[in-house]
Image (cartoon, helix red, strand yellow):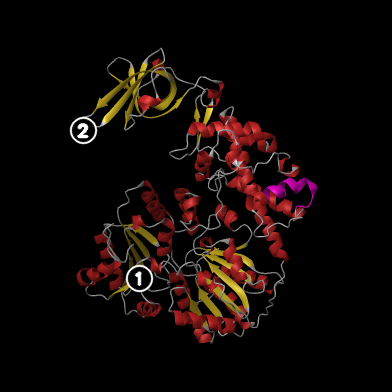
Amino acid sequence: MDLQKDVRYLKGVGPARQRLLADIGIRTVYELLTYYPRDHVDRSHLKLIAQLQDQETTTIQATVVAHHPIYTRSRKKLLKIDLSDGTGTATLVCFNQFYLKDTLPQGRTIIVNGKFEKKTSPANAFEVTNFTYEVLSGDHEDLIHTGRIVPVYSVTQHLNLRFLRSLIRQALDEYRPALAEFLPPEIISGQSWLDWPRAIEYIHFPPSFTELELAKRRLAFTEFFILEMVLAVKHFKEQRLVKGNSYQLKKNLLTPFKQLLPFEFTAEQKKVIREIFEDMQSVHPLNRLLQGDVGSGKTVVSLCAMLLAVENGYQAAIMAPTEILAEQHFLYLERYLHDLGVKTALLTSGMDKKEYRQVKTDIASGQVQVAVGTQALLEKDVSFKRLGLVVIDEQHKFGVRQRLSLRGKGSQADVLVMTATPIPRSLALTLYGDLDVSTIGQLPPGRLPIKTYKLTEQEAYDFVKGQVSQGRQAFIVYPLIEESPNFTLKAARRMATDLQEKVFPEYKVGLMHGRLKVEEKERIMADFKNKKIDILVATTVIEVGIDIANATVMLIEHAERFGLATLHQLRGRVGRGSDQSYCLLVGEARTPEARSRIAAMLASTDGFKIAEQDLQIRGPGEFFGTRQSGLPEFKIADVVNDFALLSQAREMAFALVQADPYLRQQQHAPLKKFMIEAYGNSLNLIQVG
């Protein structure tokens, strides 16, 4: 009995329904059985119409007794359908649903769920406007549609919910013997898990809400456990790879670099540098995540790793998800590496073609020692002479394949993954569970916590004037470069002119945005750093990589338009010196989510707390925006609310892999088969055979 059998072979599924099922991701019997309900409705206790209360949302069973077609004053059709269950009457008010006159003829018995409103006339009559209904056919099949806890699935306009529910019941009855338990005895032993076949059945048709919760818990654990097993096997294999590079601490670049820095490393930076250097000097590849809050000094730590590679004769590459971020990294690295005689180059798809070809040639010849770029670095015609270290920034914007692809341009090159977005621990275990983790938790000495205020625009302008008059500098950030007919938002280019002419005529106002060329951005930032610009108007182009110690004010216009992570990153552009710094939020938060973001910013400057709140507000699916490559798609598991379950699954998975890394023991054969079917073997995560 094959769970991978095409659903078209199930009774009642013709070519048309096969296409409709494919539209919601159901092609096989397995996909049908694991298409979990989005909700459950308790129809085990139907109410009599005589028992209804005004404004009560509940379910009744009644028979159609009359139709009343009505034309409104605007000549639109309105249909009212009278129902009776012998104890009273209720009326369905059907807007734009005139077809229900034929669908629900007199004498038809139906189940209706909705909010019932008591009418004054006739006495004790009820109306329901927003409702769902199901037609009872009178046979035993209705026992899966009513008289029990009923599953509700996400369906398309043309895919009937009742049909899908019946099809899943049919598949369960026919294929339940194929749903064999695959978790090994040491995982199940001592746990109060439902077995997998029963969990699958109860998630669809639970005898009670208690069994439903048990099914959800078992299936959530399974999703976490399978993911952590894949990560554990991958981590085990990574630890046994032997790289082609070897390093010694020669310090002919590292020592001069340290002398160039205008600051001392913090204790945590030193600790992380030691961890990275130890991994790089190992025979096994470095495979580490470096995370820390805004301003904690991750980039300079990664630069130390790049210099260790370069002083040993290897090339380093740093890949960022956007051209803007790649440019900022290039400008930052060039500031130090130029003085050390280290050749750096930028490679992005938006470059001039002639320049692009020249940079590729220089990378291939080894002339470029540190290559900075976007996904252009992954192109097949981009090759390195001797790539030793790969640094990937904002790893969550890339997938595992891209990480492996860049590493593959060297001989098992070392990989350092960085993120400027603090990762909640629950997501770190799912996104980066195969990596060793280094965290920089402290800010450099002398830094004061940034004070954040919600102000009116005029209050904010007055505050900026007060700071600039004392010799400080300020950022003013807008969500758009140009004004748009689609948004009633102020934009950077227009406001830079207005602010210079009308608000801050006595000070120099500059403008920075993503459409400027690299050289122009470099000139503007140099002018700002050298205090030739007092107030820099910008877009989120300055979200990362900008370090101006004298800038003490970050004014964010239309703050409600920005995500929480972006707001926190922008705030981190100030507070780089020893002076007190401020973040000023201007705008009207009209939605609950916007108000929650502003409240979070006012309550804390801790990036990890901010990240946890961001995860709570947006949920894991949106935490990293639309390009959340690598984030597992869980159907039941919730990384926000099921963290204890995730930790338990991880601990058990890593212990199992430690004992049987290739799952060769007979008792692990079903688990190995399930993992390969669930995740595929395209990344060679598991040795087959």
Q: Position of residue 680 (x, y in %)?
A: 65, 54
- Identify the secondary structure beneath mark 1: loop
Q: Is residue 123 above or below residue 494?
A: above
- Residue at the spot x=29%, y=15% of the render? 122
Image mark count: 2
User: Which quadrant holds the N terminus?
Assistant: top right
Q: Secondary structure at mark 2?
A: loop
Which residue in the rendered view is the most extreme toward the right? 666
Residue 67 is one of the magenta-drawn residues: no
Q: State the residue position of label 1.
A: 513
Asked where in the image residue 240 lies, by quadrant, the reply is bottom right
Q: Residues within 10 Å of mark 1 (few under 14, many from 20)?
A: many
Q: Which segment did they paint magenta? A: 663-675
- Alpha-carbon span between mark 1 and mark 2: 52 Å
Q: Residue at x 51, y 60 (%)?
A: 422
Residue 74: numbered disc: 2
Q: Residue at x 63, y 70 (%)?
A: 408
Is any part of residue 465 visible from this angle?
no
Q: Is residue 668 magenta?
A: yes
Tell me: 155 left or right of 553: right
